[in-house]
Image (cartoon, rainbow, N blue to C red):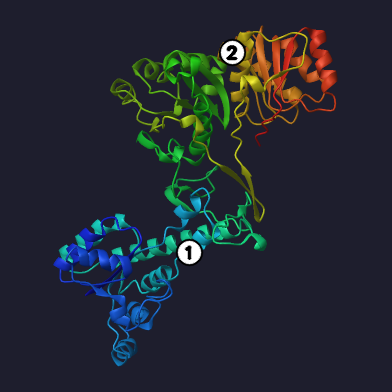
Amino acid sequence: MKALISVSDKTGIVELARDLHALGVGLISTGGTAKLLAEQGLPVTEVAEVTGFPEMLDGRVKTLHPKVHGGLLARRDTPEHMAALKAHNIDTIDLLIVNLYPFEATVAKPGCTLADAIENIDIGGPAMVRSAAKNWKDVGIVTDASQYPAVMAELKANGKLSDKLRFALSVAAFNRISQYDGAISNYLSSVNFEAEKLSEDYVPERAQFSGQFNEQYVKVQDLRYGENSHQQAAWYRDLAPAAGSLATGVQLQGKELSYNNIADADAAWECVKSFDTGANGDPSQFAACVIVKHANPCGVAVGANPLEAYSKAFQTDPTSAFGGIIAFNRPVDKAAAEAVSKQFVEVLMAPDFSAEALEVFKSKVNVRLMKIALPANYGDVRNALETKRVGSGLLLQSADNHELALADLKIVTVKQPTPEELHDLLFAWKVAKFVKSNAIVFCKNGMTMGVGAGQMSRLDSARIASIKAEAAKLSLQHTVVASDAFFPFRDGLDVVVDAGATCVAQPGGSMRDQEVIDAANERGVAMVFTGVRHFRH
């Protein structure tokens, strides 16, 4: 049995080679890998000795040879193949261990030159991987150090790899080649090539959106059904999911997550993550709670602890909270768990749960508990891009990660907001970003008081928010309002002021801005322009 080893990332390779040698496997290797193994006292044959042809062109050509690819591609059960090998003095290669030049890591570095990017496009490695993966019935193809233990376990136990493992390794190999080629395509088709600037230290400008967009995901699980029971669905995650994202979560208990659970959970989780700092920038000074129903926040609040935050959020709309998705940005303790357990909840998410909190939910076996660890800077961890599937195409945009600061607010009325109103305006604006357009959000004292979402008319959203508040027996007097887009006429402003609002935040930018400003002055309320809108469709 012979193994060909050629790796860029040498993690664990010496130990693996040593184990292979102990089993009597002959070792063939290239360049730096061969040198490393020889330095460790392992008997290794260089590829140049096998091919009878030296490495050339700075190592660009070393394994592109019939004695390598013949040894990988020959079918052992085909007499003609084996006769051809014998005629040309080619030995079979039974195990190929390859990982590729670090193209993705190279182009991710600031200031990466075009020359460095091109030099880190592996040619021989992918060619060998494809040959071995195609001939999976006879050749084991190992493309990642995480696969070493499984390979060695089978070799030690059985002296060979099982069909099941060889096929799994082949699938993983083709997946890796697909990812690699996709990364190269994304990079090269984003380069704004300028021939007159071409040099070894040329760092090209790159378009934000590449000429061809290649995405790669791995399946987390099949789902029972999709948005509706007649639809099929599965959940996928990024190859390298961001810390603190939903895809990194661990389900601690409860029924299997559904398609709608996951969609709503993501809406709740992304919203609660936006509340990452408390008073004086100290995140320990408050907890945030978000309750989502049908992708819209129906209650959001901050408090001194999870219980207070939940209690305030629940008050906004107890009816909609029934069967909702709840997210906390702080670990859930016993007090919060006992309060939440009194309502019907589909999914409960938090960075952690105390032992007492977990005990509370033991009897609620259907409640899905999700633990999602949050990094220290979790407010900055966001998806960079957003996609939306359309007929035979895809819409791609940078994610709406804009964060509004107090200094961004432009006060446009005679009446000035109070410090308390300004604080609540920033809170309301965070929430409005996660409410489906048209969005109107009433807030007071770090709590949503009424939410109007997803209406064709901004007037209707304002009215619905008022109706929701009345149904929850919440007074909208002296509240602040955030509108995700500008008021095209004064009528929308009049509705929220009639309901009790004393301060309004809106983007501005309408041709009738002055009409709306005049109306605010007439009604004696404060109004600020944010300069940015938050449509969410």
Q: Quadrant of the N terminus?
A: bottom left
Q: Nearer the viewer, residue 99 or 326?
A: 99
Q: Is residue 443 visible?
A: no
Quarter residue 354 falls in: top left
Mark 2 secondary-structure assignment = loop
Q: Position of residue 422 (x, y in %)?
A: 63, 14
In percent of the image, x 47 and y 17: which residue is there?
A: 310
Task: Quickly name the residue at label 1.
Answer: 119
Q: Nearer the viewer, residue 287 or 3?
A: 3
Tag of residue 472? 2
In percent of the image, x 34 and y 77: which residue is there?
A: 72
Amino acid beneath label 2: Ala
Seen in the image, is 258 located left or right of residue 37? right
Q: Nearer the viewer, residue 516 or 293?
A: 516
Q: Is residue 52 visible?
A: yes
Q: Position of residue 437 (x, y in %)?
A: 68, 31
Q: Look at the numbered discs 1 and 2 and tell me whether their residues touch, using CB distance below 8 Å.
A: no
Amino acid beneath label 1: Glu
Residue, far bottom: 87
